[in-house]
């Protein structure tokens, strides 16, 4: 066995990852050398624009509010992170780029929605699942989509080593023809399509999309379900279809279609309370070995933080440094070119602390993981085995046996 994790934290790896771990460390060193001059700090882009605060609910019952972004920005400023990053402002996305993944009727709806009066806004919103509209919705949605394009382009071009796009409304639930789940446009999908089809000169031929939001990224999955250029990985609460978005295609058996079979990976938790150990296990035994084989050119991270400890929407238990460790493990791929695009996360304190921990990782800061519990659930081990069995035909690296005699926690009772 070997040990590899964040400074101050140890996690035991299965022997099958010895060679890959060594390769990753070499690739991380190589990436550092190509992305910046020796001794220089990483150039981390940080996009924040107050115009995206204009998308705001009329009442107090909505969870997706402008305060989410304000809390993050206050935390990053207080910790000195904002001054260490390359500040960026949002750009409005061109309609043709949005229309590359969304139906024209859908694009027109979002463009015109803010011109309606209050009663029409409410009436239109009721036609969709968990969506609200306001006078600032149109501009915010176009800015959010344009922002992720902007940062992804600069990271792909090598102008930035990595970037964080603090955007709202979020995107990963938005489908081809409809908004859904607080999401109006699918920001990450739009950026991925832009890199693959609009900017071939940037050399981005394979994209890994990692969605660690506590909810399944249904919209993103559907947009790339038959596309082998995009490896989509979503780890989420599923609860046998009883957790939002309440759809069967969040199951582990949905692995892609046609030439995209094997390129869609769902790790569906069976219950709440999953935390650092469960996510680290999913990384080590599913995501990392497949990512090594896929060898992406860039990573787009649908960074929802509603699986964070303290966020009652997800009722899971990832700590800020747990997120930091997950992100650290991804830095060994794609020369460290990672774009974080904000998705969910509805406890202002939890989301602010989690984003801050991730920003510090991208800036090169060290951290120590002092997780109260580093035993995965029994159900986690079972889900991981099911995922591996479903995908091993497409990814032979998943054919080996999982470690035995692993200390596991019992499934929580309710």
Image: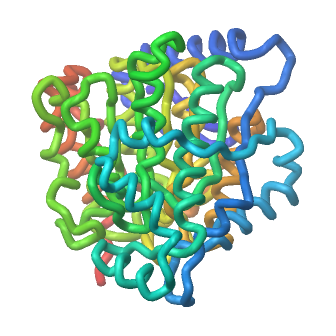
**Relative to the observer, which residue lies in front, 271 or 346?**
346
Does residue 268 sit above or below 58 in this rendering? above
Q: In what quadrant of the picture does the C terminus appear?
A: bottom left
Kindly tell me whether residue 405 is visible in this rendering.
yes
Decide: is 233 above or below 251. above
x then y, percent, for residue 112: 46, 63
**Snapshot quadrant of residue 380:** bottom left
In this view, 304 is above or below 150:
below
The residue closer to the viewer here, 145 or 343, is 145
**Residue at 13% across / 37% down in the picture?**
390
Residue at 64%, 52% in the rendered image: 166
Looking at the image, can residue 318 be seen?
A: no
The answer to whether residue 364 is left or right of residue 229 is right
Q: For the point 55% across and 42% down, which residue is it?
A: 93
Query: For this view, does 165 lie left or right of residue 406?
Result: right
Q: Quadrant of the N terminus?
A: top left
Q: Give the vertical position of 219 relative to 63 (above or below).
A: above
Q: Is residue 304 left or right of residue 178?
A: right
């Amino acid at each position: 066995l070997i040990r590899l994790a964040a400074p101050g934290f140890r996690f035991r790896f299965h022997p099958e990852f010895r060679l890959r771990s060594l390769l990753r460390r070499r690739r991380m060193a190589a990436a550092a050398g190509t992305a910046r001059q020796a001794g220089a700090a990483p150039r981390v882009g940080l996009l924040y624009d107050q115009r995206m605060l204009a998308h705001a609910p009329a009442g107090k019952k909505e969870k997706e509010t402008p305060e989410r972004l304000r809390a993050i920005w206050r935390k990053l400023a207080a910790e000195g992170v904002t001054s260490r990053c390359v500040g960026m402002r949002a750009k409005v996305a061109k309609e043709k780029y949005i229309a590359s993944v969304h139906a024209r009727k859908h694009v027109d709806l979002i463009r015109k929605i803010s011109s309606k009066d209050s009663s029409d806004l409410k009436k239109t919103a009721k036609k969709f699942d968990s969506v609200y509209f306001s006078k600032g919705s149109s501009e915010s949605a176009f800015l959010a989509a344009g922002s992720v394009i902007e940062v992804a382009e600069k990271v792909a071009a090598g102008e930035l080593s990595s970037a964080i796009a603090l955007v709202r409304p979020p995107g990963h639930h938005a489908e081809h023809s409809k908004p859904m789940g607080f999401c109006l446009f699918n920001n990450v999908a739009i950026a991925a399509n832009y890199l693959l089809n609009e900017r071939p000169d940037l050399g981005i031929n394979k994209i890994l999309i990692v969605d660690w939001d506590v909810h399944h990224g249904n919209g993103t999955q559907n947009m790339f379900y038959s596309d082998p250029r995009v490896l989509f990985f979503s780890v989420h609460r599923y609860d046998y279809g009883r957790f939002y978005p309440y759809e069967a295609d969040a199951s582990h058996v949905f692995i892609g279609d046609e030439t995209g079979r094997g390129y869609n990976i769902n790790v569906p938790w069976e219950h709440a309370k999953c935390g650092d150990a469960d996510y680290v296990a999913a990384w080590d035994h599913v995501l990392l070995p497949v990512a090594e084989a896929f060898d992406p050119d860039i990573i787009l991270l649908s960074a929802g933080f509603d699986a964070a400890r303290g966020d009652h929407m997800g009722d899971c238990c990832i700590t800020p440094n747990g997120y930091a460790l997950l992100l650290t493990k991804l830095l060994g791929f794609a020369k460290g070119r990672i774009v974080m695009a904000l998705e969910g996360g509805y406890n202002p304190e939890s989301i602010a602390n989690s984003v801050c921990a991730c920003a510090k990782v991208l800036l090169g800061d060290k951290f120590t993981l002092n997780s109260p519990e580093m035993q995965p659930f029994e159900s986690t081990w079972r889900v991981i085995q099911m995922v591996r069995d479903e995908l091993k035909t497409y990814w032979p690296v998943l054919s080996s046996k999982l470690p035995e005699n692993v200390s596991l926690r019992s499934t929580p009772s309710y």
